[in-house]
Image: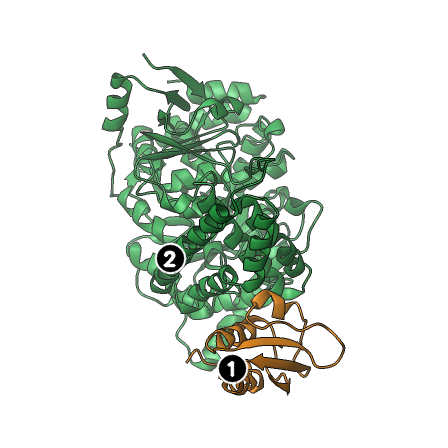
């Protein structure tokens, strides 16, 4: 018998079994003992933690130098310097003499320097983050991993957490962990999308009950049924270990009556190209470029971007790779781009608004890399602009492309203008879809943002999760309007939001007339299978019934009918 | 005890890479080295502490007073003067 089963939202059609490790980044230290500590013992613990930290930093520095580059590795040298800083050493010793355990002493010794650096201008204020990193590393070592290091988890770990941020998931090694479950979150949360892109078993939004599962417990994380099974019986374990691997199809698919649908992958970093290929993607329908800008002190240079794009083109020599230009703002912050704090970041300066404004220089660099990649070997390049709301923005972006092309021609640099497109994510773009489609080769619907803006319901706000659903008739009608506008103007139209990767919706999306569906790699086999099971006519009939529906509930019934 | 006043050349002042190089150089020598801004009456701080020297707020063009004591005091002062008078783009890790 299974001990108990907790229900949540499945993030991936995959299940895994493993041993629980809790990740609690905000865990408070326990109160220090009132009757003081053995000073020598605490000093010894501090010395030991410091020497282990130094070894870890040395290893990470080497690994980073190998994988990324010497410049990026230099940050670890700074960490070692902080680790050995006499001011820190004196501060820790003084605090231990005051009767604090080593971990509390470390927290106290770092407090003032962190505050001091935080108060400084420009890049020095980033040193505060380095100090925090060093402090957290020492505290982790001193508390025996109460603060878990995500990058060094043993094989077969199931990570449990309240939530996982992008910097948390970036540390997870998908080859090693068996899956994760979070108390908060929805299908469209960052962590869920991350899990799908790597075919990692994951359940999100389990709720507070998750906290009752202790470290070391064996659990099944079933992303298919959306449940976490505590102490599964042998039958359940065996069923999970067998896994459920869909049949992968590497050839392009068409409906029974011959309408070809491109089924492509959303890719957020180069490591995901392999997953995309192995799941049978025809190409890349959304190549996010933000990874090039994260975890560093300055924007990437043109050559670095060129190489990343040509790597993707080389991975799909017979396919198409749609690159989205830099899309920061909203919840995506990049320190050196100097993003202001905004009261409503999702309604603020993000996407193309920044590329035509404060980020015009990085935008130009990116366009140069893209136009050069347009002439490179491999698959066909396409480029699209995010969060366009007006025809004027698109015209301005197209002008930049022209002027970059002219510059490259003057310089005698080999280049070609790729297919150009616009993302349909705002109601503004839907209502202007005709005029936008006239000017470009394709449109691509980002359903996560489109649902958020059409329904005025924030993606990460659980209290309005029900509204943030693309099956609400207003969102479906916005999709229909966009498809018609594209086809009336000889443009093709794709969809790259989470909606495109829901196999239950494949038929209705084919019926709505989408030419391309792009999704997290893991759902590609199921979607390909469903494309080939329907006919254009049956799909259109379903789409017509769905478009006539007045409520989300009716739509749900229609699409779930066998 | 020896001391010297040096005008800081690197654009970053006594921050970032020049500061890191400065600390590294201090640690390579058998000497107790302390620094303070040349003008004003700030206390001398441990030159081997990145945190302490950064807190001085020394910018390019400012003078710093370096005090060294110990076996290598002179060599340390010479080496530190070189660090502080070398433009940042010429600073190497050698």
**Dot 2 corresponds to which residue?**
A55
Q: Percent x, y for residue A559?
A: 44, 23
Local secondary structure at mark 2: helix
Relative to A561, residue A332 above or below:
below
Tell which of B79 and A216 is nearer to you. B79
Q: Residue at x 46, y 52 (%)?
A: A288
Q: Is residue A408 left or right of residue A218?
A: right
Whether labels 2 and 1 belong to a single chain: the reply is no
Relative to A230, residue A494 above or below:
below
Local secondary structure at mark 1: helix
Tell me which chain appears green. A
- In this picture the colour scheme is by chain
Q: Residue at x 47, y 56 (%)?
A: A289
- Residue furthest to the right: B40
Kindly tell me whether residue A491 is visible in this rendering.
no
- Colour applied to chain B: orange
Image-quadrant location for residue A128: bottom right
Q: CA distance from mark 2 to mark 1?
A: 30 Å
Tell which of A209 and A349 is nearer to you. A209
Kindly tell me whether residue A461 is visible in this rendering.
yes
**Dot 1 corresponds to which residue?**
B89
Q: Percent x, y for residue A194?
A: 43, 41
């Amino acid at each position: 018998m299974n001990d108990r089963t907790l229900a949540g939202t499945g993030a991936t059609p995959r299940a895994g079994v493993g041993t629980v490790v809790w990740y609690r980044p905000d865990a408070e230290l326990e109160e220090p003992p009132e009757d003081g500590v053995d000073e020598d013992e605490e000093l010894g613990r501090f010395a030991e933690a410091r020497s282990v930290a130094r070894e870890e930093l040395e290893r990470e520095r080497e690994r980073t130098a190998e994988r990324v580059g010497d410049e990026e590795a230099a940050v670890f040298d700074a960490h070692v310097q902080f680790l050995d800083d006499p001011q820190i050493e004196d501060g820790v010793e003084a605090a231990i003499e005051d009767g604090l355990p080593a971990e509390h002493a470390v927290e106290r010794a770092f407090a003032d320097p962190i505050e001091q650096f935080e108060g400084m201008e420009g890049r020095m204020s980033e040193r505060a983050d380095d100090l925090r990193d060093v402090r957290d590393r020492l505290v982790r070592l001193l508390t025996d991993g109460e603060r878990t290091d995500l990058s060094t988890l043993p094989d077969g770990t199931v990570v449990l957490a309240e939530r996982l941020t992008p910097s948390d998931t970036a540390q997870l090694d998908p080859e090693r962990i068996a899956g994760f479950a979070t108390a908060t979150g929805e299908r469209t949360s960052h962590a869920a999308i991350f899990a799908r892109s790597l075919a990692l078993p994951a359940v999100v939004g389990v709720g507070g009950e998750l906290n009752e599962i202790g470290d070391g417990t064996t659990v099944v994380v079933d992303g298919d049924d959306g449940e976490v099974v505590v102490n599964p019986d042998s039958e359940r374990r065996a069923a999970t270990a067998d896994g459920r691997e869909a049949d992968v199809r590497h050839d392009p698919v068409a409906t029974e009556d011959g309408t070809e649908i491109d089924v492509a992958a959303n890719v957020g970093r180069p490591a995901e190209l392999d997953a995309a290929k192995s799941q049978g993607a025809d190409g890349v329908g959304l190549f996010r470029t933000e990874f090039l800008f994260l975890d560093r002190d300055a924007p990437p240079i043109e050559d670095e971007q060129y190489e990343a794009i040509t790597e993707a083109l080389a991975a799909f020599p017979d396919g198409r790779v749609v690159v989205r230009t830099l899309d920061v703002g909203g919840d995506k912050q990049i320190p050196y781009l100097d993003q202001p704090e905004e009261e409503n970041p999702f309604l603020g300066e993000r996407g193309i608004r920044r590329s035509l404004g404060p980020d015009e220089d990085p935008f130009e660099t990116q366009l140069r890399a893209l136009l050069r990649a347009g002439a490179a070997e491999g698959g066909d390049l396409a480029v699209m602009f995010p969060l366009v709301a007006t025809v004027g923005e698109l015209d301005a972006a197209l002008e930049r492309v022209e002027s970059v092309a002219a510059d490259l021609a003057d310089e005698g640099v080999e280049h070609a203008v790729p297919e150009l497109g616009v993302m349909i994510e705002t109601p503004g773009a839907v209502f202007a879809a005709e005029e936008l489609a006239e000017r470009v080769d394709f449109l691509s619907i980002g359903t996560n943002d489109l649902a958020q803006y059409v329904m005025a319901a924030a993606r990460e706000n659980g209290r309005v999760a029900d509204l943030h659903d693309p099956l609400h008739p207003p969102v479906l009608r916005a999709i229909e309007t966009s498809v018609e506008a594209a086809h009336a103007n000889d443009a093709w139209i794709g969809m790259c939001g989470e909606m495109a990767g829901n196999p239950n919706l494949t038929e209705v999306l084919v019926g709505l007339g989408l030419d391309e569906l792009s999704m997290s790699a893991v759902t590609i086999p199921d979607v390909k299978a469903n494309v080939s099971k329907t006919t254009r006519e049956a799909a259109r009939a379903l789409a017509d019934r769905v478009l006539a529906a007045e409520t989300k509930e009716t739509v749900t019934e229609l699409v779930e009918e066998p | 005890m020896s001391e010297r006043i040096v005008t800081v050349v690197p654009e970053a002042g006594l921050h970032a890479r020049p500061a890191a190089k400065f600390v590294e150089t201090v640690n390579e020598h058998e000497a107790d080295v302390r620094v303070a801004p040349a003008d004003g009456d700030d206390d001398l701080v441990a030159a081997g502490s990145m945190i302490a020297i950064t807190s001085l707020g020394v910018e390019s063009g400012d003078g710093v007073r370096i005090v060294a004591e110990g076996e290598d005091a002179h060599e340390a002062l010479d080496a530190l003067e070189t660090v502080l008078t070398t433009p940042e783009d010429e600073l190497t890790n050698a």
